[in-house]
Image (cartoon, rainbow, N blue to C red):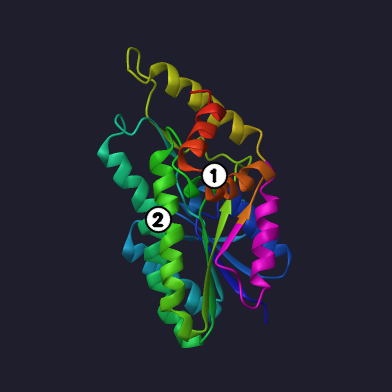
Amino acid sequence: MSKVVLITGGSSGIGKSIGEFLSHKGFTVYGTSRSPERYPDSKIKLVALDVADVLSVEKAIETVAHEAGRIDVVINNAGAGITGPIEDIPNEEIKRNFETNLFGPINVIKAVLPQMRKQNSGLIINITSIAGYMGLPYRGIYSASKGALELITEAFRMEIKDFNIHMTNVAPGDFATNIAAGRYHAPVVKGSPYEATYGKVLKAIDEDVDSGDDPIMVSNMIYKIINTPNPRIHYKVGAFMQKFSIVLKRVLPDKVYEKMLLNHYKL
């Protein structure tokens, strides 16, 4: 019997890539979207789900569990980008980003745990980001929301270990997806004290995404994890230097590492 996989944010980008890849591998795959009707040509079945709406999450989990009989793997992929000087980003946008990137996955985990306990098995994979390992200039809110999800996963793993349910993080680097199109970014304001530096960094961020790797790399990593009996706590996938930057943060003095980031962004 094929494993049943539920992927939040499965209509585009990395989530879509993962869904189609696992479907080709013989898994029973459900993706989610706030508006499934907008994707009539989706190659995987989409169910309605808004990660920020607890009732919507619970209904989607109930629908998939009833239809498929079980949920073996949940991939918390739905996420939102955000850029801007922290001083200039409206608090409502900061809260909205955390609702999607942190509280959203928590909502999904809470909703699916009873089903997985009933099965006495399950795997939850949280898609975080290499940006979550460091505070990046003009991406501080995104870094913070993804970093918080990394730590939540560490705690959750220990709390659910007696239920035969595994949980892990996958932190991608920059991949060629449409994330920039749906990202909130504070405008580059004429006369702002951040005008020159933020404009420069925003251009570099967009170029990094546009020249990013094929998201199939993430799909391969997810497939490998699903087939691993006892997954590690953290996985990173992306360009060598992006992954190596996490190692450097561990070993370099804080100010040396900060200087390296400032040089990278030409600040």
Which residue is under mark 2? 148
Residue furthest right as drawn: 25
Picture coordinates of residue 259, whole percent (x, y): 50, 32
Amino acid type at image mark 2: Ala
Kind of residue at badge 1? Leu
Q: Which SS class for mark 1?
A: loop
Q: How dense is the environment of label 2, judged by Cα within 10 Å: few (below 14), some, or many (20 and up)?
A: some
SS at badge 2: helix
* Magenta highlight range: 213-235
Left of 92 or right of it: where is 260? right
Sequence-first disc among 2 and 1: 2
User: Residue beneath label 1, please?
Assistant: 252
Q: Is residue 149 above or below residue 142?
A: below
Q: Considering depth in this image, is 229 or 123 the residue closer to the camera?
A: 229
Q: Crowding near pointer 1: few (<14 within 10 Å), some, many (20+)?
A: few
Q: Is residue 43 in view?
A: no
When the figure is inspected, residue 167 is found, relative to residue 9, above or below; the finding is below
Question: In 3D space, how far apart are the residues under numbered discs 2 and 1 (Cα atoms)?
Answer: 22 Å
Residue 67 on image: x %, y %? 52, 76
Write the residue at 63% across / 76% down. Answer: 3
Q: Is residue 125 visible?
A: yes
The disc placed on residue 188 is none
Count all numbered tags in the image, as a single digit: 2
Q: Is residue 157 above or below residue 98?
A: below
**Residue at image point 48% right, 79% down:** 66
State the residue at coordinates (56%, 49%).
251
Report if the CB atoms under discs 2 and 1 are less than 8 Å apart.
Answer: no
Quadrant for the N terminus, please: bottom right
Going by the image, does 196 lie left or right of 91? right
